[in-house]
Image: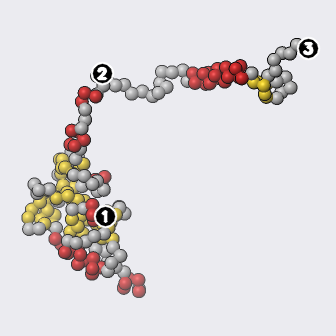
Amino acid sequence: MMRTLFKKTPIKAWVIKQVDDDGILHLCGQGVLESSDKPRRVQKALEAGRYQGGVRMGDTGIVLNSRRLAAVVPLHRLRLVEDGRAAEWQGRSWTVSQVPQRCWGYDGRLVTQKNPMLDSPALISTEDVSRIRQHINRDGAPPAEVVFRPVNALEDPLQDTRAAIEDVQERRKRSRKGWREDGTWGPLKETSEE
């Protein structure tokens, strides 16, 4: 009973990863604010747009730092419309691009692409790799077709074993060591003439 009286109610918020100038919101989804401050202080900071701290994403247990996000918005300030394809926030309408979990921790710029699998969400955010493409040297590519195969695909499986045995036998001959007639290991004596 006492535990339920003093239990903190979770403060939920919308998590926005990136806001584009062309009216696209890269939306991660809803999260629960993780803070050791009092709930009133956290709610005030959230309402003022100054919340700093962790945001636990949905039921995943993943906690994102608010510094990696464009905005953390109270639930009542952002409203999804048109089956989640658009959002109303800050007095204007935005196109929503859903940010997949793999991009939540990405620090670079996100770009949108149409969802090839389903109609909803219509847009999906993905990492912008255009800068990487600019640095690719097309002249450095191999001129012919490259064939990948296991290292030992066409080799004799006992080749390494035979080579190792021959190598050891050769070293023993040079070092003049081996098994003696008395069953011990050590330097072999030259046949002495007595």
Q: Residues within 10 Å of mark 3 (few under 14, many from 20)?
A: few
User: Does residue 70 sit above or below 165 in this rendering?
Assistant: below
Q: Residue at x 18, y 49 (%)?
A: 112
Where residue 160 sits: x, y (%)? 58, 24
Q: Name the amino acid, label 2.
A: Ala
Q: Disc 2 versus disc 1: distance between alpha carbons?
A: 47 Å
Q: Quadrant of residue 189?
A: top right
Q: Is disc 2 in contact with disc 1, using a CB cutoff of under 8 Å?
A: no
- Specify whether 66 is left or right of 119: right
Instruction: Judge by depth and name the residue closer to the eye, 135 or 57.
Output: 135
Report the residue marked by disc 3. Answer: 194
Q: Name the amino acid, label 3.
A: Glu
Which one is in front in this view, the residue at disc 3 or the one at disc 1?
Answer: 3
Report the residue marked by disc 2. Answer: 144
Where residue 128 sits: x, y (%)? 22, 47
Instruction: Judge by depth and name the residue closer to the eye, 157 or 76.
Output: 157
Report the residue marked by disc 1. Answer: 65
- Specify whether 18 is left or right of 158: left
